[in-house]
C-alpha cells in the first residue's frame, strides 16, 4: 500500500485505480474534504492482505475510515459524504422523498449496472471458474445486458444531471460506471444522453483532480 496527501485523523480513503472507487474519490474532492488516500495495488493482491482485511473483510474497495468506524459500499459512502459536508449541496438532504430518489438511483447503479458489467471480467463469482463455456456465455451477454441497464438511465436523463438541474452524488457514480461502456463493447451510439452526461462530469475540476491522482499513481 502507498499513502499520500495531507494526513487527517478523520478520513482515510482506500481505493484502487480504474475501479468504482473513483465515484467516492470524486465526491471527496467535490466536498473539499481533508482526507488521507491509501492506494491498493490489486496486481499485488493487496486487497487481500491481512492489514486491509482488518479494515474491510470484503477485500474490495472503496473503504472509508471515519471517526465512527469503517464505511464500505459506494452508495453508503456517497450518502455519508453528502450528509457530512452539507454545504457542498450534493444531495437534497432537506427533502426525504428527493433524497430517497437519489438513494434509489445509486442503489440501481450498484445492484444492477455494476453487477451487469462485472460479468465481463468476474464471471467466476457466479459460475465455476473452470467452466469455460459458462464464463464465455456470461461475457457474451454483457454488451446487451449493460446496454439495457444504461438504456433505462438514458430514458430518464432529461436534464444536465441525473436529478435534473442539480449536480448530486448520483452524477460521479454514473460517470464512473459509464466510463467503461466501450470496453464492454456497448453500443454507445444508442446512449447519447449518457455519453453527454459523461463528458459534463469529466469536465469538472474535482473529477479531473481525482482522475489525475489515480492515473498518476498507476503510471
Image (cartoon, rainbow, N blue to C red):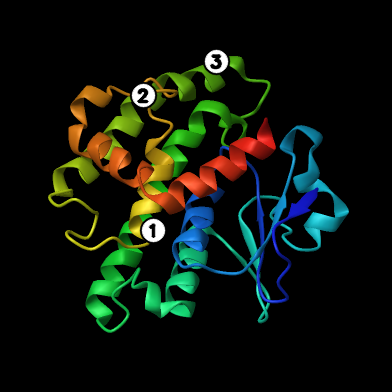
Residue most toward the right? 50
Near-viewer residue (36 or 66): 36
**Residue ID for mark 1:** 107
Q: Nearer the viewer, mark 3 or mark 1?
A: 1
- Which residue is painted at 79% across and 44% down in the image? 46
> Is 184 located above or below residue 37 in the figure?
above
Disc 2 to disc 1: CB gap under 8 Å? no
Residue drawn at (23%, 53%) of the image = 161
Residue placed at 79% from the left, 39% from the top?
45
Q: Which residue is mark 3?
A: 133
Quarter of the view holding residue 192: top left
Query: How many dots with numbers?
Result: 3
- Residue at label 2? 143
On the picture, is 174 further left or further right than 97? right
**Which secondary structure, mark 1?**
helix
Estimate the spatial distance between the alpha carbons at disc 3 and disc 1, rounded to whole Å.
31 Å
Numbered disc 3: secondary structure: helix
The quarter of the displayed image where residue 121 is located: top right
Question: On the rendered structure, is 166 left or right of 73?
Answer: left
Of the numbered discs 2 and 3, the one sitting upstream in the chain is 3
- Which mark, residue 158? none
Residue 98 lies, in percent from the top left, at 23, 73
Q: Marks 2/3: CA distance?
A: 17 Å
Quadrant in which the C terminus appears: top right
Q: Position of residue 3 (x, y in %)?
A: 77, 53
Which of pointers 2 and 1 lies earlier in the amino acid sequence? 1
Above/below status of 190 relative to 171:
above
**In the picture shown, does residue 187 fall above or below 91?**
above
First in sequence: mark 3 vs mark 1: 1
Residue 147 point in image, percent of width and height: 29, 31
Amino acid at each position: 500500500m502507498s499513502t499520500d496527501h495531507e494526513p487527517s485523523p478523520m478520513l482515510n480513503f482506500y481505493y484502487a485505480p480504474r475501479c468504482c472507487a473513483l465515484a467516492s474519490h470524486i465526491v471527496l474532492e467535490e466536498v473539499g474534504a481533508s482526507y488521507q488516500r491509501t492506494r491498493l495495488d490489486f496486481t499485488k493482491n493487496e486487497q487481500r492482505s491481512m492489514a486491509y482485511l482488518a479494515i474491510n473483510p470484503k477485500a474490495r474497495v472503496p473503504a472509508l475510515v471515519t471517526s465512527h468506524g469503517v464505511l464500505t459500499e459506494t452508495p453508503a459512502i456517497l450518502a455519508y459524504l453528502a450528509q457530512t459536508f452539507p454545504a457542498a449541496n450534493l444531495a437534497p438532504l432537506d427533502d426525504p422523498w428527493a433524497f430517497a430518489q437519489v438513494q434509489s438511483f445509486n442503489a440501481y447503479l450498484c445492484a444492477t449496472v455494476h453487477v451487469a458489467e462485472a460479468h465481463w471480467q468476474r464471471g467466476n463469482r457466479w459460475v465455476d471458474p473452470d467452466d469455460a463455456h459458462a464464463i464465455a456465455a456470461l461475457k457474451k451477454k454483457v454488451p446487451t445486458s449493460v446496454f439495457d441497464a444504461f438504456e433505462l438511465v438514458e430514458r430518464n436523463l432529461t436534464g444536465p444531471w441525473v436529478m435534473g438541474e442539480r449536480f448530486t452524488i448520483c452524477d460521479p457514480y454514473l460517470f464512473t460506471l459509464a466510463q467503461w461502456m466501450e470496453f464492454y463493447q456497448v453500443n454507445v451510439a444508442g446512449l447519447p444522453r449518457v455519453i453527454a452526461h459523461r463528458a459534463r462530469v469529466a469536465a469538472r475540476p474535482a473529477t479531473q483532480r481525482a482522475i489525475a491522482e489515480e492515473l498518476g499513481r498507476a503510471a
